[in-house]
Amino acid sequence: YSYRDRVWFDLSEDQQDGGENGIAGVTVNLLNAARQVIATVTTDANGYFDFSGLQGSTLYYVEVSDTASVLSNFFGTTPEAVAGELQLANLTANVDFTAEPNFGYNAYGAVGDTVFNDLNGNGLQDPGEAGLAGVTVRLITDADGDGIIDAGDNQIRTLVTDANGHYVFAGIPNGSYIVSITSPPAGYTFTGTDSDGTAGGQQLQATVVGGGADLTADFGYRVATSPRTVSGTLFNDANNNGTLDDVGRFANVTVELRNSAGTMVIATTTTNASGNYSFTGLPPVDDYRVRITDNNGILSGYQTTYEVSEGPLASSYDGFELVNLSGGDASNINFGYYRPPSTPLAVSLSSFHAELGGRGTRFRWTTDNEVGNLGFYLLGEVNDEWVDFSDDLIPSSVIDSSSRQQYSYESDRRDASRFILIDVDVSGKARYHGPFAIGQSDVSDPPSQMTVDWTRVRAEHTTKLAARQADAFSRGTPPAVRLLIEGKGLYRLSYESLAAQGFNYSGVRVSTMGLFDRNGPVPMAVVPEGSTFGPGMAIEFVAEPSGDLYNKRNYYTLRTDKSGATALVDDQLPGGSPQTTYQETTRIENDSRYSYGAPNGDPWYDTWVQAISGPATLTRNIPVEDLVPGAGSASLSLNLWGVTYWPAAPDHRVVASLNGVELVNETFDGHVSWQHQVAIS
């Protein structure tokens, strides 16, 4: 379950949130029944906060910790704010207190309140008139209370308006004050009445009486001439062509307008039912940045197919658009999104848990399956920005797996309460999981891990095999014999060894006995010679490797089949000097792992080497027996897979050395099977 609430400025002290401002930057803890902190969050620009992943039939405490001392000059106006905590017990559904929040506060002497874009110029902040963020506001003492900055009137505080244009000077003594903005927003004109016509900027009077608050110091500004507008549409590109056709639109998507550098939020809005958004009353003096924030998660699962700068169906998009208003309004600043068909996830995440511990934050997560997964990144939300919590890519245990994998990681940072886990596949594509609150567990209900009863399966196979053999014997035909041979050489199969395994070839005519491998009949000799096979006799043949680069084993079948009765031929060549040396191949190949994405059709491989921020090394010993130096040529062959195929090329560099001597230094690109042979002197 989830819990959502608000910390707000209860100016009227009536314990009711009647459109009053929220208080940002207040830390709130979630405690378990033993009063141990299991999660921490910070109120957003409007004072809202939430916890997710709460369990039913469990006792929790919500505690206002305020580690940044935002509330040091405030007092509680609601019972929960006075007590500093709220108790939650036996949840049966999600809880949302934002309509009637629990944590109300007023200030011990305060002056505020808003700097806003006064679109109609009436000096009042009307609905739809956004606050102006990033404006510096000064608080100055006013000894004679005339609203004019005189000699002896001193500046005592400065603040910068928040994302909604709010500011509050709290904890100040009774008296008269002047609120001053000496550097008003560029391109705007003040719509109020300046209390000091000679001082630079704009000034308003304020008075604190009886420890109360004066929140009437509102500064309205409007664009004096030729106000500009930025507008556009967010469309559902269902046909994935990157064009705004007669298709659906996205409502309730949050959009930000920032300065040209992207460092300051100027205004925020939400798309309407037609997918349209607009920012009005803007001065034509600067560039602006339109950024899609999607705080409501409307675009989850969609991928971008259109932005103005990149155009339709580009290889990548940056999620914002830079606009210039010097020549007029900026319209049709559109964004298109397409939702691809559902496909199996490359990584199926079954659990994720983060907790504070030791010197930082500890993470644990499990996956149920992984396909082409290189590894993971961890991000934490710090001051509304997602920052790295992993020093580098956290390698996957295996690239491909259909069984559960467990991971753990400890970061030396502890300044976030929400986290995102990112998996990166072999093509460089990233998939996001989360966000997850600290203390949250159980991402999903993982599929049950079914255990195969192999003993029972083998027993069933053995029973069927015995039945087939019995049937063959009853028909007077000996069953076929399956032989598994590793390596090459001369092999001997005696009558007695066959009988010991239950194969009765007594009296079988030698002319009907045939030996086969996967390529067809194999020459063999029956010794001693005779017309029928029986005790004291044996079959001799020369076994060869299968010819498969990835398998040393070869399978042979002995059965009664005249077509395979091929005899070995005696060597009739005259004697001579025997060959004293021969060339032999030593193959190091371990079929240890399986990959769904093999580039050459053979899914088995030995191991994988992952070079993330530097080289990675793999060492193999090559056994060579009875080496005769100088008797012939030698070579080294390598067969590797490239796993990644990221945009930058080349993806891979291979350096191979033998006995300390570098033999190979090559690069190749993409998800391919790479083979290389080099002579050894």
Image (tube, grey):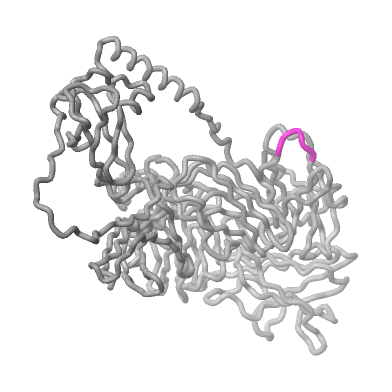
Q: Is residue 634 left or right of residue 327?
A: left
Give the answer, above or below, for where 242 lies relative to 655: above
Q: Residue furthest top?
A: 474
Q: Is residue 581 left or right of residue 447?
A: left
- Is 43 covered by the magenta stretch? no
Instruction: From the viewer's side, name the closer residue of 640 and 65.
Output: 640
Q: Is residue 90 left or right of residue 409?
A: right
Quarter occupied by residue 580: bottom left
Give the answer, above or below, for where 249 lies relative to 612: above
Prevailing secondary structure class for the magenta stretch in the rendered image: loop
Q: Is residue 135 left or right of residue 521?
A: right
Magenta-colored span: 55-59
Q: Percent position (x, y) of residue 501?
A: 38, 24
Quarter occupied by residue 609: bottom left
Instruction: From the viewer's side, name the closer residue of 181 and 557.
Output: 557
Give the answer, above or below, for where 569 lies relative to 42: above
* Residue at 90% in and 65% down: 210
* Residue at 43% in and 63% down: 318
Q: Percent position (x, y) of residue 667?
A: 32, 68
Q: Residue furthest right?
A: 210
* Residue at 78% in and 40% down: 88
Q: Percent position (x, y) of residue 539?
A: 25, 32
Question: Which quarter of the rendered picture does the N terminus lie within?
Answer: top right
Residue 270 seen in the figure: no
Give the answer, above or below, for where 88 lies relative to 159: above
Q: Percent position (x, y) of residue 307?
A: 37, 59
Instruction: From the viewer's side, name the closer residue of 436 and 21.
Output: 436
Instruction: From the viewer's side, name the closer residue of 516 and 15.
Output: 516
